[in-house]
Image (spheres, grey):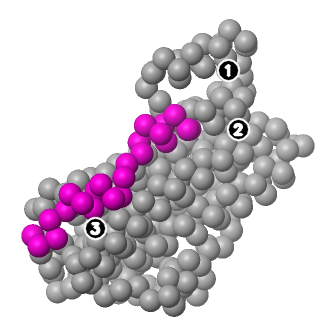
Amino acid sequence: MTAPARTAARDAGRTGAQPAIITDLYAALTERGMSLVDVTWEQHRLHESRRWSVVDMLSAVDLDSLTARDRILVWNAGRAELTTKPGADRLERQAEAECRRWGSVNPSVAAVMEACGTWSRYWNEEEAHHETVFIQLAQATGMEPISDETFIQFRQVFPDDDMLRTLVLLAISEITAAVNYGQCQHVVEDAGLRRIFKQVAADEIQHRNYFVSFAKALVDSGEYHPKDAFAVAHLFLREDGELQGSTREQRENRGTHVNWWDHLETGGSDFRPEAIEKKEQLICGALKKITGIAVGSRDEVEDTWMDLLDT
């Protein structure tokens, strides 16, 4: 970025221009000359604009009005969110290693990795809000408490993988969470609880957009092949795949980490926040943003993945 351009970007931040995710990160770093300081400033501006208070959110919930279904939804959400810190910790560690690996090979890819690792601190903080608001609400309504043993078990860190595959997996995980919370939002009656589900769903969509941005930057660099993005999407979308969550007859016993959506409990209610078709379309949309390849269904994802394996 030239000196006048950098001054203009800095002034835009100071004068209240709407903060936003940099959706073309690789071009911003290589063509527009943004520095990592510039990228970090934009990350921070957006983070500050989206901050909210767990204490205030909890105080607005009428505990006496919550139904048995409301309480089980909150209980499940608290356990699901307990597993997110390991993802953020892993991302920071993996991004750091990848930054060092690419430093002498492709400095622009190294910068993308560093931007991703830097942003993970905001992701970690925001997920801490989600975890805390749901667990504290579950405890306040008398739901089964989380033992120290469960807490430690749910903090297991995911095993490392290729960075593009990791980012796509995280984007799909955020899609899953956002849709689930959106579905919950529509079935609860208490305005305070509805506001919590709405806020957390909005946060998850923002996280999805960040992961898409980082994944797109890796594909744009030419160093990562789109087939890996489609491979992960196929893992979720295939018949009886990860996207089916707790509805599957057989679930993986990973032995390394916990995915609570695999173990969703209904507490006797018929409601499940799955909305598979909506998640499928959002995954297809994410693939289009990341790779530039348009697909519209599970079958098209599989066909495209198979075609890309030959390229």
Mark 2 residue type: Ser
289 relative to 255, above or below: above
- Mark 2: few/some/many CA within 10 Å (<14, 14-19, 20+): some
Q: Is residue 259 left or right of residue 65?
A: right
Residue 117 % position (x, y): 67, 51
Of residues 45 and 111, the one drawn nearer to the viewer in this rendering: 45
Pointer 3: what residue? 274
Residue at the far top in the pictured view: 4
Residue 12 % position (x, y): 53, 18
Q: Quadrant of residue 228?
A: bottom right
**Which residue appears at 63% of the width and 36% of the height?**
40
Q: Secondary structure at mark 3?
A: loop
41 relative to 167, above or below: above
Residue 135 % position (x, y): 36, 73
- Mark 1: few/some/many CA within 10 Å (<14, 14-19, 20+): some
Q: How many marks?
A: 3
Pointer 2: what residue? 221
Q: Is residue 56 left or right of residue 101?
A: left
- Mark 2–mark 1 Cα distance, whole angstroms, equals 15 Å
Mark 3 residue type: Glu
Q: Nearer the viewer, mark 2 or mark 1?
A: 1
* Location of the N terminus (image quadrant): top right
**Which residue appears at 27% of the width and 62% of the height?**
58
Which residues, given as a range, are shown in magenta?
Answer: 43-65
Of residues 265 and 148, the one drawn nearer to the viewer in this rendering: 148
The overriding secondary structure of the stretch rendered in magenta is helix
- Mark 1–mark 3 Cα distance, whole angstroms, equals 41 Å
Pointer 1: what residue? 32
Q: Secondary structure at mark 2?
A: loop
Q: Is residue 246 left or right of residue 220?
A: left
